[in-house]
């Protein structure tokens, strides 16, 4: 994988676009509504920001020009996947202001952070307050609170709120939501990849002040290098089925034995346990090699319907083609580790590549650069969608109750434009959103009810539902079902 993609001073060029037509700014804050009234009006549907029972979608464009300021960033919210509103730091009631290079929308996550039944939205602003040109930003996270009237501006969070001094740490470069303490509402998990070797912030944990976990935290106990980028990629899932989610923190540039081999650390914040996964972990297929970028993408889903979350790990730098050059793009693989009573079990892990699937592995495909899990066929277990942006494709594997993911009936969907499949999001209703950067295009693939080893998604239903132009990275990040 090219080392340039690991540079933290800029966002990796993923989705290039601008909104096709102007969208009205989100309305300013209204009078406070008692939580009891809001709770009756809100649906509890994941990603439903306005409580109407329909899933909404937030699409980030971190390089959008706002008020003449380049790369200030914006987020477009599609209420009910239709009505469009645009969020920026210049919006009414939003603290601060849009500034050049802020990258508002460097990450997004939806979750019910206050337990009122309406989904809230967290927006990363990883390059906020850059010391100078070419420098990394100190970063911040802007919260928007859901309500029957839609999203309303909330508080701004930065490193100082988590007990750390602010520095060029890219606070908010990754975000995830999950119920870590089992109290029924979500906590916000924040990536801080520039903090030393990186860090993971936890905000809203019951009975605890917000805090940051690093590789050298006592109970994590890992070697830390400044280039590791621990926390650059995040996911949450209840891997042991105890009703509390754990955190999966990707460090795709982690150097353990080989430069940039990558790692994923599973953090159980309640028990204060950390388990590091690499391609050298027992029973994981393959071996760690330089610039594999193990952990460059993560997704959680229940692929075998046993009630425990499973973890899919993207390894887009993995080389399968003979004579691949070091530090260049890879064919790519995906490692899947299944949940169990004691947590993730590498003994039941499996590795997937286009060897044995539809399509064939090719130099620079980057199979596994993006991942999404969802029940696309409606049979109660999740399927796995794998981005193959070097091939302008998405590969879909069906889940089964008899053993998890299967290659049977695997589906390869190709798309228009460059880098189709570089960002993916599963949305309620058995659908998948696929982003393509070359044409600034978001494609919707519809799922269908069909029990068994079927991917569910139907290529014939593919339709463009959002387009844009320019260099704004529209679609760089998209909220997903239950994110």
Image (cartoon, grey):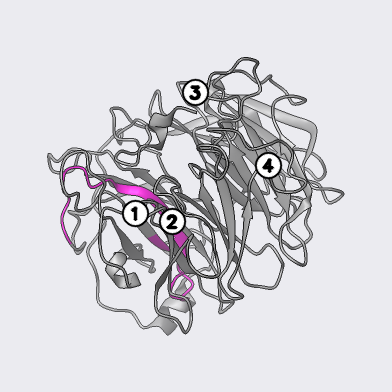
Disc 2 vs disc 4: which is toward the camera? 4
Q: Is mark 4 on a helix, strand or loop?
A: strand
- Mark before the other along the chain sequence, 1 or 4: 1
* Residue lying furthest top: 323
Residue 17 location, x and y as percent? 33, 31
Mark 1 surroundings within 10 Å by alpha-carbon count, few (fewer than 14), some (14 through 19), many (20 or more): many
Mark 4 surroundings within 10 Å by alpha-carbon count, few (fewer than 14), some (14 through 19), many (20 or more): many
Verify whether residue 101 appears in magenta.
Answer: yes
- Mark before the other along the chain sequence, 4 or 3: 3
Q: Are marks 1 and 2 in contact (CB under 8 Å)?
A: yes
Residue closer to the observer: 259 or 77: 259
Location of mark 2 (residue): 175
Q: What element carries label 3?
A: loop
User: Along the horizontal axis of the image, is 98 left or right of 161?
Assistant: left
Residue 118 location, x and y as percent? 45, 68
Mark 2 surroundings within 10 Å by alpha-carbon count, few (fewer than 14), some (14 through 19), many (20 or more): many
Disc 1 vs disc 3: which is toward the camera? 3
The circle on residue 335 is 4
Q: Quadrant of residue 151?
A: bottom left
Location of mark 1 (residue): 124
Residue 482 higher or lower than 386, as above or below: below
Q: What element carries label 2?
A: strand
* Residue range highlighted in magenta: 96-121
């Amino acid at each position: 994988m090219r080392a340039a993609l690991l540079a933290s001073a800029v966002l990796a060029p993923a989705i290039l676009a601008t909104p096709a037509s102007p969208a009205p700014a989100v309305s300013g804050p209204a009078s406070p509504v008692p939580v009891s009234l809001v709770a009756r009006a809100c649906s509890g549907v994941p990603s439903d920001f306005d409580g109407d029972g329909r899933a909404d979608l937030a699409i980030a464009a971190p390089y959008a020009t706002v008020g003449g300021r380049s790369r200030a960033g914006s987020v477009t919210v599609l209420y009910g996947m239709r009505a469009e509103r645009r969020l920026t730091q210049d919006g009414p009631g939003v603290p601060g202001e849009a500034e050049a290079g802020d990258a508002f929308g460097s990450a997004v996550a939806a979750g019910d952070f206050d337990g009122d039944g309406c989904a809230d939205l967290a927006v990363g602003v990883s390059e906020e307050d850059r010391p100078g040109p070419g420098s990394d930003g100190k970063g911040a996270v802007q919260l928007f609170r859901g309500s029957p009237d839609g999203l309303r501006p909330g508080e701004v969070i930065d490193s100082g709120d988590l007990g750390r001094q602010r520095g060029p740490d890219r606070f908010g470069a990754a975000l995830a939501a999950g119920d870590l303490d089992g109290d029924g509402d979500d906590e916000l998990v924040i990536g801080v990849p520039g903090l030393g070797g990186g860090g993971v912030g936890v905000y809203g944990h019951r009975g605890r002040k917000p805090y940051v976990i690093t590789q050298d935290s006592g109970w994590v106990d890992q070697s830390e290098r400044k280039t590791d980028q621990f926390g650059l990629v995040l996911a949450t899932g209840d891997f042991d089925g105890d009703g509390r989610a754990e955190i999966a923190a990707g460090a795709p540039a982690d150097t353990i034995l080989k430069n940039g081999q990558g790692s994923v650390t599973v953090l159980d914040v309640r028990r204060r346990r950390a388990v590091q996964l690499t391609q050298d972990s027992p029973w994981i297929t393959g071996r760690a090699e330089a610039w594999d970028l193990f952990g460059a993408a993560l997704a959680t889903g229940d692929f075998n319907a046993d009630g425990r979350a499973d973890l899919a790990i993207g390894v887009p730098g993995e080389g399968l083609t003979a004579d691949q050059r070091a530090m260049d793009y890879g064919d790519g693989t995906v490692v899947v580790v299944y949940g169990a009573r004691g947590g993730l079990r590498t003994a039941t892990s499996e590795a997937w590549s286009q060897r044995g699937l539809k399509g064939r592995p090719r130099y620079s495909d980057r199979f596994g650069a993006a991942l999404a899990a969802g029940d696309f066929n409606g049979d109660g277990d999740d399927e796995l969608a794998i981005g193959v942006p070097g091939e302008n494709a998405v590969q879909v594997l069906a889940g089964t109750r008899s053993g998890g993911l299967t290659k049977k009936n695997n589906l390869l969907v190709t798309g228009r434009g460059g880098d189709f499949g570089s960002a993916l999001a599963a949305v309620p209703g058995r659908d998948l959103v696929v982003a393509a950067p070359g044409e600034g295009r978001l494609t919707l693939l519809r799922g269908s009810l069909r029990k068994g080893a079927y991917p569910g998604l139907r290529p014939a239903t593919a339709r463009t539902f959002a387009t844009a132009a320019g260099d704004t990275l529209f679609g760089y990040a998209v909220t997903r079902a239950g994110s």
